[in-house]
Image: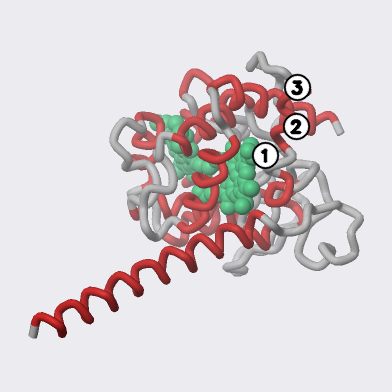
Amino acid sequence: MANFLWVLFGIIIIAISLGTISLKNQFIKELNREPYVSDSAAAAPTVSTDTAPAAATVSTDAATAVTTNSLAKPASYATCAACHGQNAEGMKPMNAPALAGQSDWYISTQLHHFKKGIRGKAPGDITGMQMQGMSVMLTDEQIKELSGYLSSLPATKVTKTVEGDIEKGKTLYQNCLACHGADGAGMVALKSPALTGQHDWYIENQLLGFKKEYRGYHEEDIQGKIMQGSAKMFIQTDQDAKDLAAYIMTLNEK
Ligand code: HEC
Ligand code: HEC
């Protein structure tokens, strides 16, 4: 009987380590992907080369047709405007990011995650909680129309607010471009969002938020965990987050 228990114990330990290894391998695989270059033929089919990232990417839950022309503003956006602005340009006093021009699949995923408590429910995440509270009343239909509408808008012309060392940020960004693209346009295949058209203060906040496990805490948040791992690995100090945000801002000029 005692022997049997030891064997069982052994099997459980092996099962746990295999699980950990496969998760780690998945993460390493993501990290080791070839850096994305916009003129690389290999990357062509899935990745938009447009600087306005959302316009050309195809929705994964494709019922909403996304075109380069802005869609009509849905009534459901009225409540969002109080924090995100009339043109979804984002508002610093509300800590609300720009949404205009972000990819529809990313917006849709985040809204579903907020609604299910996969994002915005970590203790201490004040800004996440604000948005989490707003998401619960959204229907699946509204999430679909809002995602399509927001991604059809022209990206926000962002201006610099964060002081950082652009050169240091550029060096650090070498760790990010495999997933977010050298141009910061994001990659649908890796489910990594565009970073251009986004405010530097929000980028800085989120990078620190991933480190604090405000994002990626939920077991269903695969992408959040991947990004959390990157933030923990590559961002050592608060200044690193500022330097990265400052460099990412320069990608808007290209
Ligand atoms: C009370 C203010 C407030 C309202 C109203 C609000 N939001 Fe937000 N929203 C925020 C804040 C703050 C964040 C940043 C959350 C964080 O720090 O993680 C956010 C984040 C988001 C994000 C994540 C963006 C990203 O880049 O990850 C999406 C998408 C979003 N909001 C959509 C909406 C939509 C759609 C509505 C209307 C139904 C809405 N929000 C209403 C405050 C608000
Ligand atoms: C292994 C791929 C990968 C790497 C490397 C990576 N990211 Fe990410 N990043 C992601 C994914 C996937 C998400 C979306 C997470 C989610 O869905 O919640 C993300 C989200 C983000 C966000 C949140 C954007 C928003 O609108 O809320 C920021 C900011 C960000 N990444 C910046 C960076 C920076 C800076 C680096 C380099 C230090 C980096 N990422 C490295 C995959 C990656």
SS for tag 1?
Answer: loop
> Residue 39: where, in percent of width, then height?
91, 55
Left or right position of 178 against 231: right
Q: Which residue is mark 3?
A: 166
Q: Nearer the viewer, residue 60 or 149?
A: 60
Q: Nearer the viewer, mark 2 or mark 1?
A: 2
Quarter containing the N terminus: bottom left
Q: Are marks 3 and 2 in contact (CB under 8 Å)?
A: no
Q: Which residue is mark 2?
A: 171
Q: CA distance from mark 2 to mark 1?
A: 17 Å
Give the image quarter of residue 249: top right
Q: Are marks 2 and 1 in contact (CB under 8 Å)?
A: no
Which amino acid is tagged 1? Leu
Q: Nearer the viewer, mark 1 or mark 3?
A: 3
Which amino acid is tagged 2? Thr
> Residue 170: where, in percent of width, then height?
76, 30
Left or right position of 25 against 53: left
Left or right position of 214 against 238: left
Q: Earlier in the sequence, mark 2 or mark 1?
A: 2
Disc 3 residue crowd, few under 14, some 14–19, many 20+, Cα 10 Å: some
